[in-house]
Each structure stands twice: as C-alpha cells, then as structure tokens.
Image (tube, helix red, strand yellow):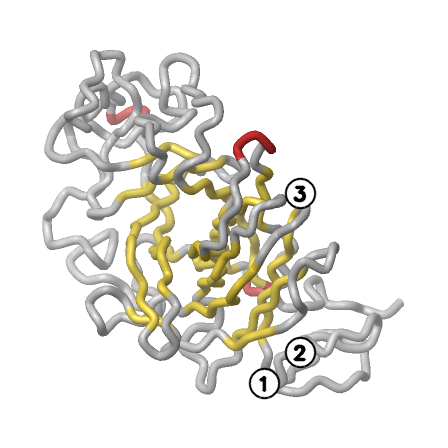
Amino acid sequence: MKKISAIIVAFLMMITSWVGLMPLEHIKASTQINNAVFVAVRWVPVGYNRDGSALSSARLFPWQRINQEVWGSNAYPMPRPNAPRPATQANSSKPLFYTEVYLDVTPAGGQSQLSNHWYIVMDDAGQIWFDQDGRFQDSRESGLPLDRCDPNTGKVDPTGFNNTMGPYMIGDYIHFDHSKKFPFSPRGTLGDFPVFEGDYTGRLFGLGQAELGDSQTRVLLMSEVLFAGCDQTRYNLSVQTDLWHGVQPSVTAARLYSSFGDIKMNAQSVQRSTALGTGGTNFFPPATTFHNVQIRHRSYIGVQIWKDDGVNVNLAGSGNTNPNNLSDDYVPGHSGE
C-alpha cells in the first residue's frame, strides 16, 4: 500500500469561515467594503519566545516585565472550569500557550497597517482568554450588580482595569465590538447568556485549532462570520498567519474557495512585509488580503494555507512539485506540497 503523508497539503484548512445570513427584513442595499480576517497563528509555549529561545528572568510572556503579575494574582487566581468565584490556588489554572493577533488589517498596498491588537493565552484546562493590555484577570461574572459605566463591576476580579475576555474553548464563538456589549463570555456567566434579537452589529469569530503536519505545532484558528445575501456588502478578507514565518524567500501561500463559485480561485503569497503593526516596525503576524470578496450563499468558505516550497510530501508519489508557483501541485496519489 502506498504510504501517503498524514497531511497531503501541508496545511489544508477547510476548517472554514462561517458565513452568516442576515434576515431579509434587515437587508438594505449597500456597496460598502468591510475589512475581515481569517487568523491561523501558532500557539507558542509559555516561557519561550516565538523563535524557541527561553525568556529571561522566569517570565511567562515576552510582554511581561520582571516580577510583574500578568496571570491573575494571589487574591484572584485565574480559574479552572467550575472554580468558585473567586478561585483559590487549589483550583487555579496555569498558562500553557500564548499568541497574538490583530483583528484589523487595513489593506493599502505597501503601506498596509495592522491594528486592534490582542494577546491570547490558553491555559492547562484548554480555556482561552483574550486581553488587550497583556494582564489577564478573572473576568467571569461575580453576581454583584453590574454598572455598564464601569467595566469592572460585576467581574470576579474588580481590581485595576479588568479588560480580559473569557473563558472560551475551541469550538466557541467570541463576539467583539457588539453595540450592546457582552460583558461576560457564555462560560463566564452565572445565568443565561444575553441574546439581542435582530442586532447584527459587531464582529463574531469562531475559534478552532489544527496541527501543522508532522511537527505537531498547534495552531489557533479564528474564522470571522461574514454576511451573505442580497445586499452588496463586500469584504477585503485578510488571511493572517505566521506559519513558516522567517523562511526566506517567503514560502507561505493562501487561497480562498467557495463551492458555489462566489470567490474567484486565486492564490497569494503571505509576505512578511505585507502589513505593519501600529508602531510602524512590527511585521508580526504577516497577512495577505483578498479584495472585494462577496458571499452570495449561506455556506462555508474554504481557506487553504500551504508551504509553497516545491517539496513533495507524498512519500510514495512521483509527481512534480514546484516552489513559489502559488499552486499546491496536488495530484491525488502522486504529489502535493
């Protein structure tokens, strides 16, 4: 029997973006272009830099200052699932992995910008926490009265500026920038999670996970929900990924796919210099933007990311593969990058 690589295409992600459908009574003609992102970034082990080198001074994360508390506190430890509110040290969680994303990619050719930066941590219970200042706090609902003018009230840890979001798990959805706000995650509430009928503002992401080939590198996936239907809403959809980051020249390529033919089949290289962070010096993570994407059907769309390096990973195959040709060179039973 021919031995075929466990992953024929080094990283084929048909773990796809949801496409939401707005009810007809809410549809209005629109010609606007919205920015959206699909994220596939590596989970980095706590205590290490992205390049695998150890962090100095027993720090957990690169952004942490020496002796700075960034993962809960003695009074308010970060909780395991079903921990009391507040948690105790006996039922506290420990961070295992971290990563970073930018939820906004403003495409402008060589002057594209990254913004809306988030730090993300997965703990040893599989819980995922999001934070913009890098100081993670217990953001579950405490049961105390909530004052919407003070974002700390009602949270288990009321100290400082608690802007942590979570906990979430792989398979959950996270809602950013909703006009009426979601003060707690579904797993962090004490009662029923609030549902706002007919309010489609904000941005919704599905959380997924994958492994990269035989290296067992864990990858966080964030798939933004897009609107489909009769309106004219279009998207500049950026694929943001650090897979094979640092390889020169760049070998990371991306492609979108729709089974309905909504999206023109074309592939693009994910270059390190595609977009800059808000400081003007940071290229992490790289991104490439597919312009004027319009979804016309309620469906999934596919996102494929592969290593366009010309290496045939079909060990039993004899087909040809070529580097940097924006094709995965996949021939069933013969070849594939």
Amino acid type indicated by mark 1: Asn
Image coords of residue 29 (percent x, y)? 53, 45
The residue sitting at 65% across, 50% down in the picture is 296
Q: Are marks 1 and 3 in contact (CB under 8 Å)?
A: no
- Seen from the viewer's position, the closer of residues 39 and 32 is 32
The residue sitting at 46% across, 34% down in the picture is 200
Q: Is residue 98 above or below residue 298?
A: below
Image coords of residue 258 (percent x, y)? 69, 57
* Quadrant assignment for the C terminus: bottom right
- Seen from the viewer's position, the closer of residues 133 and 73 is 133
Q: Is residue 189 left or right of residue 229?
A: left
Image coords of residue 6 (percent x, y)? 70, 62
Local SS, label 3: loop
Q: Which mark is residue 298?
A: 3
Amino acid type indicated by mark 2: Ser
Q: Which mark is residue 327?
A: 2
Residue extending farthest front = 29
Amino acid type indicated by mark 3: Arg
The residue sitting at 38% across, 57% down in the picture is 44
What residue is pinned by disc 1? 324
- Seen from the viewer's position, the closer of residues 53 and 312 is 312
